[in-house]
Amino acid sequence: MRFRISLFETALGSFRAGTAAYENFTEVVTAIATSLNTTVENLSEIATSVKATAATWLPLGTFILGLLTLALAILNFLVGNAAKNKIMTESWKDT
């Protein structure tokens, strides 16, 4: 009789340990899911921030790049004309 009770107590103890392990497992899975959800929310906020920053700085950067290109074109024109004038002046002196 004592053996049967001991076996029952062992089975009950195993069941309790299994239940506790299941509860711990459930808590761990819930914590991981919460963490992943927070990570996804953070990534979403970062993406929104990057999109807003790009929307702000991209047109300004394009405008500045256009101004630099225009300045280089004007400089190229002026240097080219100066070189052409110098060549014309030098060739005129030779005649």
Image (tube, rainbow, N blue to C red):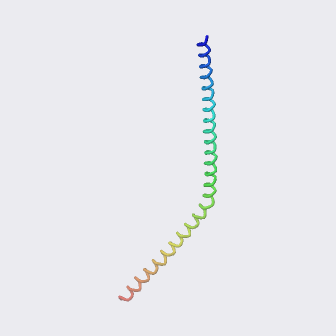
- Where is residue 40 drawn, in percent x and y? 62, 45
85 vs 34: above or below: below
Left or right for 89, reference 6 = left
> Which residue is at the front of the view, 79 or 43?
43
In the rendered image, which quarter contains the N terminus? top right
Q: Residue furthest left?
A: 94
Q: Position of residue 48 (x, y in %)?
A: 63, 52
Eyeballing the image, is 62 above or below 75? above
Q: Residue at x 63, y 25 (%)?
A: 16
Q: Which quadrant of the rendered structure holds the C terminus?
A: bottom left
Residue at the spot 59% in from the left edge and 66% down from the top edge? 63
Give 11 or 79, whichever is nearer the viewer. 11
Numbered label tally: 0
Relative vertical location of residue 42 with respect to residue 64 in this rendering, above or below:
above
Find residue 26 and report its horizontal and vertical position in percent: 63, 32
Q: Quadrant of residue 54?
A: bottom right
Seen from this angle, which residue lies furthest front?
2
The foreground one among 6 and 40 is 6
Residue for point 42% across, 83% down: 86
Say if 35 sits above or below 18 in the image: below
Q: Quadrant of residue 85?
A: bottom left
Name the residue located 43 percent from the left edge and 80 percent from the top edge.
Answer: 84
Which residue of the protein is positioned furthest toward the top in this rendering?
1
